[in-house]
Image (cartoon, rainbow, N blue to C red):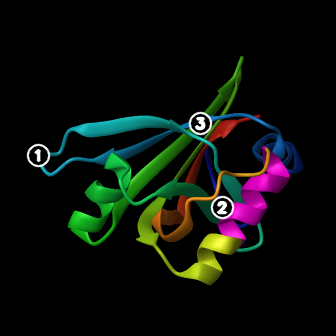
Amino acid sequence: MAHNPHSLTDEMNSFLRDRHLASLTVLRPDGTPHVTPVGFTWDPETATARIITWSGAKKVSLLEASGGGRAALCQVEGGRWVTLEGFAVVTADPEQCTEAVARYGQRYSPAKDRGADRRAIIIEVDSVLGRA
């Protein structure tokens, strides 16, 4: 079932706050999917998903090479699932990376210091599928 990312149900927002991992899907230049497990955070007020990573990650190089692109995050637990879709970009901006790391620490655990290699993937979510 499709949902407006700016008005998800309380159950969906709660599920997106629970400690779960997800799969991130981005596209390679030949159109095939690159899928990798990630931790992420969800901001329901801005419909933004954030993933912390580092400069050498394949997901980073794929998004940087294309100037950003469509991405999907899918979180599953039993019969509950949510897929967040939207345009993803990579940033090395210290303020955005610090915010992403802080949010990650609240949902999961403190992140390793990556120094200048720290990157954040920011997804402006425009479509949500799922049931929670």
Tag 3–tag 1 contact (CB < 8 Å):
no
- Residue highlighted by disc 1: 30
Q: Amino acid at mark 1?
A: Asp
N-terminal label among 1 and 2: 2
Quadrant for residue 81, please give it.
Answer: top right
Residue at x 49% of width, y 65% of height: 119
Count of picture labels: 3
- Residue highlighted by disc 2: 5
Mark 2 to mark 3: distance in Å? 17 Å
Residue 48 position (above or below residue 9): below
Which SS type dominates the magenta stretch?
A: helix
State the residue in front, 123 or 12. 123
**Res. 43 in view:** no
Element under disc 2: loop
Mark 1 residue crowding within 10 angstroms, few (<14) / some (14–19) / many (20+)? few
Residue interval drawn in magenta: 99-108
Mark 2 residue crowding within 10 angstroms, few (<14) / some (14–19) / many (20+)? many
Q: Quadrant of the C terminus?
A: top right
Q: Quadrant of the N terminus?
A: top right
Element under disc 3: strand
Camera-side mark, 2 or 3: 3
- Residue highlighted by disc 3: 22
